[in-house]
Image (spheres, helix red, strand yellow):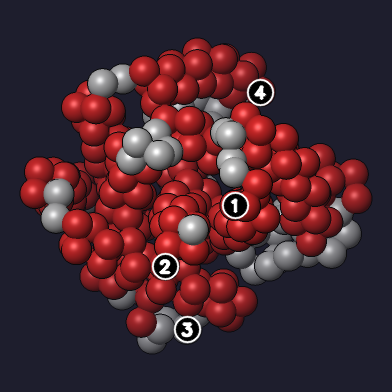
Amino acid sequence: MLKHRLLTAFILGPLVLWGIYALPELYFLLFVLLLVTMGAWEWSAFAGWNHKSSRSIFTALSAALYSSILWFNHIEINQAVILISLVWWLLCIPLLISFPFKQSHLLQKKLIKAIVGILLLLATLISMVMIRNNPNYGSEYILYLIFIIWFADSGAYFAGRSLGKNKLIPNVSPGKTWEGVVGAIVVTFIVSIASLYILDIPSSDSILFIIVTFVTVVYSIVGDLSESMFKRMENIKDSGNILPGHGGILDRIDSMMSAFPIFFAGLWLMEKAG
């Protein structure tokens, strides 16, 4: 398992990073569209659909919606999708705390779970594209976000493994601890300080940029927990098996699904504050 995990990361990691940094705009759009469409296929299982026919219909409709949103590129619609996703992430914390749900809970309904998945994947798609296409940000900011989450995950893993005693939300993810969260925050602080110089952040924006990064990383943990919550509702171990040793696409981008919309919103607030 570890061998497969390392091999997959060694092969796909550099390719994905190169694609984010170097692909022309059209090919980047297609790349992200493919990513979220594959995520939609996996989410159909989270919604409770087990037959290939129903999952295929869900995925096709999701892909059609995503393509239409990209094609029309209506700024008000894009902003509305991101805003609605931010409301979800605010509501997600009390949902995680109150898990497991009764069978009558609204989130137990297939249609509601399907809508949530479509919305979250769409918000991820829109925010990634809007960050990359903004001349003030571009690929560097997308790579920054990916790296900061990777570093935070590593900090959480090692701190949790060596010091972890107090469970974070055991009903959702028994392995995560408050000590791991502290480890992620410490690493985030160090990396974000160093990145101020790499990204050439103006000194007047440095504190706000660090705050935006902190909030983003905290919610990347919420995104991870959210996926675990949906998997537990359907007794699913991994979202898929397309990535040997890593599981499915959603298992790799769960943190990104919360991080990208929140990071985009934070950058927007920085622009308004400036």
Residue furthest out toward the right? 163
Query: How far is disc 1 from disc 2 in space, using C-alphas?
Result: 23 Å
Q: Residues within 10 Å of mark 2 (few under 14, many from 20)?
A: some
Q: Position of residue 225 (x, y in %)?
A: 57, 59
Instruction: Tell me if residue 25 can be seen.
Output: yes
Camera-nearest residue between 105 and 161: 161
Q: What residue type is disc 4 on?
A: Leu
Q: Nearer the viewer, mark 4 or mark 2?
A: 2
**Which of label 2 and label 3 is nearer to you?**
2
Mark 2 and mark 3: Cα distance apart in space: 25 Å
Nearest to N terminus: mark 1 or mark 4: 4
Query: Tag 1, which secondary structure?
Result: helix
Q: Secondary structure beneath disc 2?
A: helix
Which residue position holds label 1? 205
Residue highlighted by disc 4: 2
Q: Position of residue 20 (x, y in %)?
A: 39, 26
Q: Is residue 161 placed above or below 74 in the rendered structure?
A: above
The x, y position of residue 31, in whole percent, is 28, 29
At 49% across and 73% down in the image, what residue appears? 90
Q: Name above or below for residue 213 compared with residue 20.
A: below
